[in-house]
Image (spheres, rainbow, N blue to C red):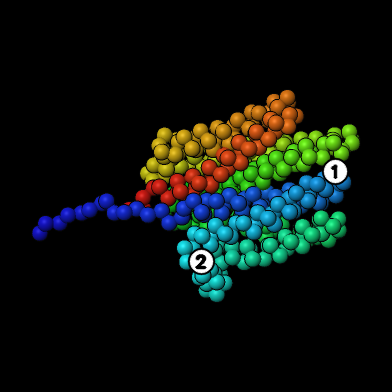
């Protein structure tokens, strides 16, 4: 009997760019909200603008994020199935609850922050913090549970997602805060300008710390891939010498993390508004590419 085995089975990547963008946006949201809550808890007058930027930004960002999920469904009218057909052990079910409950809390929190009702803002900020973290954190758990995907199935992924979310959130807040400084430059007193510059410096220092943590986590992930299974080593090769090497090494690592880290380590650049914005913009590009590599690159190792 003539037996012929055919290996050129069409290979489909089920999760695409829309999911990567969704992960990126929810990460920005977590960075916005966390920074805002910290600024609100500090309670000092000079931190109030940062608290407002973060509170409003978190709500705006999270109203955009579900759009990409709905587009990815392809059958948008069936989105209500997520609320009816529940699986309590599924991160997607929990994510559905987080995505619907947080906007309500976030709206009230933003309202109290904008109205200067500090006590209620602090209480609601703390209550909403675990949910805000979970809105992005659950996406990391979804990938970890992707059995057979060596780049996803790593216990560091949820932590990496949260840290990179803080990196991107801080970067965009720094840019917005600098735009605000320019817009109100003519109306600000020398004391207010000094306070604004000091707060930006603190945010930049936080950004540097989170970039370093992110690099350590990425290094750990790479080391595990390089010294694990054959599939894991193949993924390592794709990232370091294969089709994703330019995007991973050149854009995500070099442009998105190392160059901003070097720039912000130079006092003259760190205190320069243009330098701050360029470094922050590089970070945002790098984290966006990171999300694409994780989602699409993680599906590039065939399961058959």
Please tell me how crowded label 1 is: few (under 14), some (14-19), or many (20+) other residues with Cα within 10 Å. Answer: some
Residue at (47%, 63%) from the top-left corner? Answer: 74
Task: Between label 2 and label 1, give the one nearer the viewer.
Answer: 2
Answer above or below: position of 20 versus 103. above
The residue under the point 77% across, 41% down is 180
Above or below: residue 46 compared with residue 263: below
> Position of 298 compared to 177: left or right?
left
Q: At x 53% / y 35%, what residue is drawn?
A: 251
Please, what secondary structure does the residue beneath circle 1 have? helix
Residue under circle 2?
76
* Mark number, residue 46: 1
Give the secondary structure at mark 2: helix
Q: In the figure, 17 relative to 212: above or below?
A: below
Give left or right: position of 26 versus 190: left
Compare residues 89 and 272 and report the one nearer the observer: 272
Report if residue 199 is visible in the image.
Answer: no
Of residues 137 and 154, the one nearer the viewer is 137
Neighbours of disc 2 within 10 Å: few (<14), some (14-19), many (20+): few
């Amino acid at each position: 009997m003539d037996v012929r085995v055919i290996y050129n089975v069409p290979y489909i990547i089920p999760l695409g760019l829309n999911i990567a963008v969704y992960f990126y946006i929810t990460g920005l949201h977590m960075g916005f909200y966390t920074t805002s809550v910290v600024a609100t808890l500090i309670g000092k007058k000079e931190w109030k603008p940062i608290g407002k930027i973060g509170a409003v930004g978190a709500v705006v960002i999270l109203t955009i994020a579900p759009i990409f999920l709905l587009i990815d469904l392809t059958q948008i009218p069936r989105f209500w199935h997520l609320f009816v057909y529940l699986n309590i052990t599924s991160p997607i079910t929990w994510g559905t609850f987080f995505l619907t409950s947080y906007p309500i809390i976030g709206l009230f929190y933003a309202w109290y922050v904008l109205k200067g009702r500090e006590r209620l803002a602090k209480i609601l900020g703390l209550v909403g913090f675990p949910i805000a973290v979970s809105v992005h954190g659950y996406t990391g758990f979804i990938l970890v549970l992707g059995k057979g995907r060596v780049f996803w199935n790593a216990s560091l992924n949820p932590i990496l997602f949260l840290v990179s979310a803080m990196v991107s959130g801080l970067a965009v807040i720094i840019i917005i805060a600098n735009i605000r400084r320019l817009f109100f430059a003519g109306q600000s007193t020398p004391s207010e300008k000094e306070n604004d510059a000091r707060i930006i410096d603190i945010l930049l220092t936080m950004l540097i710390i989170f970039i370093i943590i992110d690099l350590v986590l990425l290094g750990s992930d790479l080391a595990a891939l390089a010294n694990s299974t054959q599939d894991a080593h193949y993924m390592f090769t794709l990232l370091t010498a294969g089709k994703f090497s330019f995007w991973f090494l050149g854009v995500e690592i070099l442009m998105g993390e190392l160059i901003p880290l070097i720039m912000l380590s130079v006092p003259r650049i760190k205190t320069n508004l243009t330098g701050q914005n360029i470094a922050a913009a590089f970070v945002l590009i790098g984290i966006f590419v990171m999300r694409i590599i994780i989602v699409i690159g993680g599906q590039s190792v065939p399961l058959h």
